[in-house]
Structures are given as C-alpha cells and as structure tokens.
Image (spheres, helix red, strand yellow):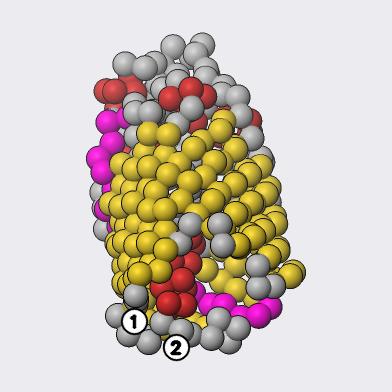
Amino acid sequence: MIGSAILGKKRLLWPVVGCIASSVTIFAEAQETAGLNTNATQWRLGVMGTLSDAAYVDADNSIGIYPLIYFESRRFFFHATEGGVHLYKGDQFTLDATLVIGSLNMDPDDLGRGALASRNVDRGQLDDRDRSYYAGLSASWASRFGVLSAEAHTDISGTSEGERYDVGYRYPWNIGRARVTPHIGVTYLSENVADYYYGIDTDESITGDYSYIPDAALLSGVGVDLAYSLSHDWSIYATFDYESYPDEITDSPLIEDDAAVRLRTGISYSF
C-alpha cells in the first residue's frame, strides 16, 4: 500500500476513523483556501509522519513516515489508500463508488508475549490479522452548517468477510490561509470484522478451550485538522484524532486500553 515505508518498531491495528486518505483530503481543502480551481485535474505529492498509540497489549507507540499520492478529476480520484469514480459530483452533494485499502492489520510479534499469556493467549499460535480490501459507496453533503458524510463498504478480499459503515460530520473554518476543521464520527464494524480483528479462536489460547467472539462494534471518534497554504503549490497540516472503543473491543484479550489516539503532520506539493 501507499506508505509501506514505516519507520516505527510496531506495526499495529488502527481504527477506521482518521485513515490516511482523509489526511490527504485536508491537503485539498488547504489548497482550496489558496483559490485553486477544484474542477480541474489535480495532482498532489507529499509526505506524512504519524505517531499513534493503538491500545494493544504491551505494544509500543507506532511511528511512521508515509509518501502521499493524491489525484482528483471530475470523474476519477485516488486519495492515498482509496480510489474510485464520482457517480455524481455537484456543488453540494457527491456520490462515489470506491475501492478502499482497510487500515486494520496486526502482527502478533508486536504484542507482548507475557501480557498475552496472562490473558490465556499464546502469542506463538496467534495468527496475523491481514488487511481487508473493501468496495462500496460513499456520499457527502456540504452546506453552510458543515459537511455530512456516509460510507458503506464490504470486504471483497475474503479476509474479514464483513462490512463497515461510517458516518461523520465536520465543520471547516477558514482563517486567512489556514483552515481549522473539527470533526466527529462513528464507525460500525460488522460481527465478522470485529471477530476477525479482535476475536480469539480456541487454538490461539494457551489452554485450548478459551475463545473470544465479539459482537458487532460501534466506535466513536473526535478530532481536529489544521491546514495551512504556504503558497499556491505548497501546504502543511497537522491532525489529532481520538477514538473510543466499545465493550466489544475493550473486552478483547488483545486490547489493554479503551481508546486510541493518533497525531499526524505532513506537507504536500500541488501541480
């Protein structure tokens, strides 16, 4: 995927809210404050650094550096980890058909062996949780009251074999060349997705008779995006996201905290 050059020690799960693609969109919004024609074909190249605590058992914070690629036209788009076709693109309402690289994945070696053992989990038997690849629809509606968005996606890779649904709201403030955008959102993970990424099978337990099978989970998150246009071509930004986990996730033996946080910063060049 875009951004495979990760410099941190840990390679952990990260919830859906605050994915890389949304970060690249901040670049686009920052450029809008510089007066670019948003109907024209746009390219952006940049780099993003991340610092995150994903709440996993005995895991270090994750530090990463990712290259960013952004393409936008009247018909097609590609935003770092998602791309697709604009089925309808108006001044206020947009409907897209999308393909998305999922943000959830886990390497058991990143989790503490002793901490897992105390929860009856055998790290040596714990399977990798691979990324899912999703197809679906996304829609957004902009007004003077802010921007509402909704997404519905299903796994087409056979990994989690489940669905995810996202609803969000953001309100951008333009202050000169800067843009400040607080946002809130909720993400629904189907039972299959929650079980694949947070569940435990009996053959992954030490005793061989313990399992954890979560129900579908509803995650909630808040955050703020800061973007600034240095010039007609260059933009910088920073974002902070906080996501709260429901009981279906916090009860998992893989999780030790009830929330995850992420800080991101980056720069992009537009042409």
Q: Is residue 142 magenta?
A: no
Residue at 42% across / 34% down in the picture? Answer: 244
Quarter of the image with the C terminus in it: bottom left
* Label 1 vs 2, first from the N-terminus: 1
Image coords of residue 24 (percent x, y): 45, 67
The answer to whether 193 appears left or right of 233 in the picture is right
Nearer the observer, 136 or 30: 30
The boundaries of the magenta stretch are 56-75
Relative to 119, does residue 179 appear above or below in the rendering? below
Residue at 42% across / 59% down in the picture? Answer: 181
Residue at 32% across / 85% down in the picture? Answer: 231
Mark 1 falls on what kind of element? strand
The answer to whether 154 appears left or right of 166 in the picture is right
Disc 1 crowd, CA 10 A, few/some/many (<14, 14-19, 20+): many
The answer to whether 271 appears left or right of 230 in the picture is right
In the picture as drawn, the residue positioned furthest to the right comes out as 87
Given the image, on which type of amino acid does mark 1 rest? Trp
Q: Which residue is mark 2?
A: 271
Q: Which residue is mark 1?
A: 234
